[in-house]
Image: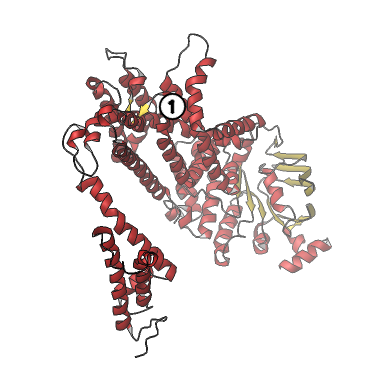
Amino acid sequence: MNLIILKPNKENLQTYLVLGIVFLSIGFIDIISNSFLNFNITGFLPSIISYLSPLILGILGLHFIRIEYSGNKTLDQINKNLNSSNINAILSLIVIFILIKYVPSLLNWAFFDANFLGNTKEDCTGNGACWVFVKVWFNRFMYGMYPDAEQWRINTSFLVLFGSIVSIFVLPNKFKKYIILFLLFIFPIIALNLISGGIFGLKWIETGAWGGLSLTFIVSAFALIFCFPIGVFLALGRRSDLPAIKYSSIGFIELWRGVPLITVLFMSAVMFPMFLPDGTYMDKLMRVIIAITLFEAAYMAEVVRGGLQALPRGQYDAAKSLGMGYWRMHFLIIMPQALKLVIPGIANTFLALVKDTPLIFVVGLLELAGMIGLAKTNPEWLGMATEGYVFAAFVFWIICFSMSRYSQNLEKKLSTER
Amino acid sequence: MSNIIELKNVNKWFDKFQVLKEINLEVKPKEKIVVCGPSGSGKSTLIRCINRLEEHQEGLIVVDGKEISENTKNIENIRAEVGMVFQQFNLFPHLSILDNCSLAPIWVKKLPKKQAEELAMDNLKRVQIEDQAAKFPGQLSGGQQQRAAIARALCMEPKIMLFDEPTSALDPEMIKEVLDVMVDLAKGGMTMIVVTHEMGFAKEVADNMIFMDEGRIVERAKTNDFFENPKSDRTKLFLSQIL
């Protein structure tokens, strides 16, 4: 039998398959025994070859089983997806090896060796994560320094918010616009008054006490709602024929895009009050929200402008030829198409905005990540930074991932091209 | 009868390149004019000046008794009276065919929604695509899209219709369905200015022919005269190539 090592072929399928699987198995046994049993079966080889041995064995194995049109469906699938060339085989092996080496230990740390029970740091005895920390501080992570007895006010606000959002999807179309109007104009006022209090016998709670995840939501929600229309108008302004509007829009956009957010926040907190007339006072949180809004609006403007420029001129011609003026043309014809085009860009900006909110720590406001930063310095809970920040990362990921999924949904739903 | 469109000594430049030279044109109500000429001769620019999709720099353009100039306050009002059909259809891809047609009547003419939709359906019937009303432009064939675009323009109940090479972007077998609609429209007494290379259509409906070359109106004649004994050599050459 004439086996051509470098060119596996269909005639000797069985032989090559056996050969390939043997090499692959040795490679996998090597990496598994290395990672979990602390035993190196290729230890007799020089150290560098021993280190790379799983990879070399795997590549050889994959090379032997790379037989085109073998007639075996499973084999063809594997070859097509993981093993289409030597380079792809190496990449596949590296990814698989990394997963084998690190996923189990990560799972051990996060779940199997982790501590969930107890109320103090001393209850954490295992080698894994100490989730007791998150459990004990959970209330602070959610509400900041907001008094426990008043937290129902935040809960109510957010329940109403989520209720209204859900009802937009559930209720028939004719109620939708009322709910959207309510959410945009009435709800923010109610929510602000409810959370800050001071009227209707509600206890006044200053914004310095607001914090945790609820503050993340408050800052993000207000900034998202306001930065969008401002961005749209800036984008239109930048394309305007009127020089005054055009150049002030360009100036505004380039100014805010050119400055780091942390500087903007710092200025809003420290410098801005100096420019206010004596006796006037603007709440710190309000200033921060305005700063983030204007900052993100500049980015939003450029995203929207990209969409405007992608539209063919014929759309403008057609709208004009029907007698539409500037505003009707833009809001009935141009914007709906341009915004649809840039949904991925808008989602990008919104995600960046949510993830930028932790920066408000520079002015002393502590949202989720800020509260974790505070909690980890508590003398009774030193050394819990990892757990805290993993928790923060997880929460932010959930928020951002759902926003991203929603934007993809929206894109699909609005697509009218075939 | 007084002229519904009048152009006097109209000049237009794109930067330094002069696209329209000393254009004079009168159009009477219900008149059908077909404009032909080689590409780049300024035909499209000429009709785009009539509803000010392009601005002219010199001369006088009067549409339905109103002068069109930089200072025209209510250019939208004039545009609402002048329907336009484009080579690339330019339907609004984010709206259904029905919404494409009823949008401008609702927002520009302020018709109630129900009435505007009835008007739209009437015009879609007129161009024989009423069964496509709920679809989006992307789901229609080229010929259907162009007929929808004609219906959309008709929904504004214009006094004048401008056609800018309406069949040039169509597959050959779809040209006829669009031309049929236009012939129908012409017989209904619409004032029409049509830029086209479809000489069969021109012979059938045009009252007057205009031949343009290098930004000038080279020849203007009754349709029969134009085809039977053209005066200028340039026209003869063009006709010999196109017929």
Return the x and y of residue B44 as percentages of the image width and height.
Answer: 69, 52
The residue depicted at 47 percent of the width and 30 percent of the height is: A293
Return the chain for callout 1: A
Quadrant for the C terminus of chain A in the image: bottom left
Quadrant for the N terminus of chain A in the image: bottom left
Q: Is residue B50 above or below residue A281?
A: below
| Left or right of B231 on screen, residue A260 | left
The residue wearing badge 1 is: A362
The residue depicted at 51 percent of the width and 41 percent of the height is: A335
The residue positioned farthest toward the top in the image shown = A279
10 Å neighbourhood of mark 1: few (<14), some, or many (≥20)? some
Amino acid on which the number 1 mark rests in the picture:
Val
The residue depicted at 36 percent of the width and 77 percent of the height is: A64
Regarding mark 1 in the picture, which secondary structure is present there?
A: helix
The residue depicted at 58 percent of the width and 49 percent of the height is: A312
| Left or right of A332 on screen, residue A60 | left
Out of A150 and B90, give the one closest to the viewer: A150
| Left or right of A299 on screen, residue A223 | left
Q: Is residue B140 above or below residue A222?
A: below
Return the x and y of residue B143 as percentages of the image width and height.
Answer: 53, 59
Return the x and y of residue B83 as percentages of the image width and height.
Answer: 60, 45
- How is this picture coloured? secondary structure
Q: Is residue A114 above or below residue A243?
A: below
